[in-house]
Amino acid sequence: MADDIDAIFARIGFGYWQLIATAAANLATAALAPALIGSTLTNAQVQYRCQETGTLNTTEGFDNGCSRSSELVIDMQTVSNTTQQTPTIYETSNSVSNTSCSSWEYDTSVFTSTITMEWGLICEDAWLSSLYQMVICAGCMMGDVVGGAFGDRIGRTATLRYGSLVVVAAALGIGLLPIYSLVLVCRFALGLTLSSIMYPTFNLVIETTPTSRRTVVGMILCSPFSVSVVIFTGLGYFLRDWRTLHLASSIFAFLLLPVSWVVDESPRWLAQKGYLEEAKDVLKKAARYNGATLPPTEELDKIMQKLAADSEQTSAESKNSSLGDLKLIFSNRPMAAIVIITPLTWFLMSIVYLGIPLNVNNFGGNPFIYVALTGVMELVPIIVGVAFSKRFSRVPVMSISFFGAGLCCLVVTAVTEEMWWLRWILVMAAMVMISTALTMNFIWATELYPTVIRSRGSCSCSLGGHFGFFITPFITDFLAMRFLWLPNIILGLCGVVAGTLVFFLPETKDLNLCETMKDVEDRWKAGKCKQSTELRNLGVLSYVKSKDDSSENSAIGGNYRH
């Protein structure tokens, strides 16, 4: 069944019809960027001091103090015609006692308003400041579970449309609500819905893209995040009020809502669910939009009938193929390896990926330049990675990227602050490497999981990734308070471990997408996979369909890779 569908999409090609879904996926990814890393500017750490009242505080500069110091001086005044003395108490700047502050002044030379400033999230309330970043990561983790289930059950487009409505409401709530607890609720909802819609939408694009274009399209889908980071930093430079910056950077979320209602459902998903007529209608629309021709009606009907015959078996497997069904998963060796290792690599990768930009407060330097450069570094793998990924397989690219990022983070701990230029080079090199791994991991996760559990499989990877995002603030904020060098050590070790784990995953470059878990197991046992080869002159692909593992194969431009 995989070959038949891939052959049809090879004839349809990649054109205007796929661009609609690609636009939706790009907007979802772009909307996630300011939500995920926006706290670097909207909740930036600022200097503060006890607010002066009269002569209560004569401290010059911002000392980040949570109490004021004063000396009590008693002037005994004799009250006339009595023997009682009434003391006059006043305070001087000489420090002999401490008094807790009731209000603070903030350094507004860089940011006029931040989350911390508005609600006074410092001193004993400093832990509340970290919740702003943590709740959206918690929402993303929950969204991975919800998005995977809904993406496979109600469809890719339904998940996208209904989720977009919640995204807009949550984004407006964050920018307008005056109560911090309600802002946190909206942050959680924003993370939940963005995560829920991003991966099903990503799968929709990959499932409708010809195999020869999959790598290029997959890497293009990752570029909006990097572009959005750079745009967000530019907006932050001119908009120093956190509410204004948040609403302005939510433009991608607002644009996603109308676009989501013109996206067609994935024909692969429709076929898996037995909606064969609907799948055929979508394929006809795709061919019409792209100016392509489908196979003759008789042949197309024959393919649909074959899909109908396979749909009952596929549907039965789908019902039993939940990632929670351990017996089914672990009886299939390659699927067990995929299900265990991929979320773990995503967890480790995400700690490094988010830890580098969040570590700006410990790294020093201009925060706008630092965050903007991390976004620019993310574009490098997309610009040069297309040709690189076509030449090399998934496993070596991923391993080198992980090892490179980890080693750069480890080495930077040994570089002194006087060699600031070398520290910047190492950090940005680590960002390039980990961005390469992230870009390829989006594509690889989609290729590793079969259609019956692709959304849930991809979202399980995202769940591991967002759990890594969730604990990253603990590393960059709390641990750094005690050991400033520790965050980079942890980031480095995460990269090295992830680079080792990828060797246990199967190679998928230039291979057709699997439809069922049995396809994954058969490909593993046979020790050989079909490889599609592009006909350079015609710009289309021909696929091989074998009758069994021992039969001879014939194809136009096709071969086997052992």
Image (tube, rainbow, N blue to C red):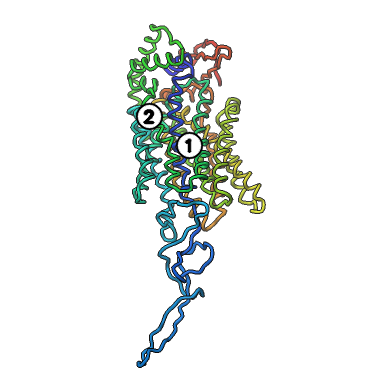
- How far across and how far down the image is residue 284, in percent? 39, 14
Q: Secondary structure at mark 1?
A: helix
Residue displayed at 47% across by 33% down: 337
In the rendered structure, which amino acid carries the disc numbered 1? Ile
Residue displayed at 46% across by 33% down: 338
Residue 258 is marked as 2
Which residue in the rendered view is the most extreme toward the front?
A: 80
- How far across and how far down the image is residue 242, in percent? 44, 47
In the rendered structure, which amino acid carries the disc numbered 2? Pro
- How many numbered badges does the structure rendering display? 2
Tell me if 494 is positioned left or right of 85 in this view.
right
Residue 507 in view of the camera: yes
Return the residue at label 1: 341
Which of the marked residues, 1 or 2, is nearer the chain's N terminus? 2
193, 78: nearer the viewer: 78
Tell me if 264 is positioned left or right of 510 in this view.
left
Q: In front: mark 1 or mark 2?
A: 2
Quadrant location of the C terminus?
top right
- How far across and how far down the image is residue 285, in percent? 39, 15
Quadrant of the rendered structure where residue 561 is? top right
Quadrant of the rendered structure where residue 81 is? bottom left
Q: Secondary structure at mark 2?
A: helix
- Count residues near mark 1 (Cα–Cα under 10 Å), then give few for <14, some for 14-19, many for 20+: some
269, 328: nearer the viewer: 269
Q: Is residue 363 above or below residue 231?
A: below
Per the model, the C-alpha gap separating discs 1 and 2 is 37 Å
Quadrant location of the N terminus?
top left
Q: Is residue 304 above or below residue 85?
A: above
Residue 519 in view of the camera: no
- How far across and how far down the image is residue 379, in percent? 56, 34
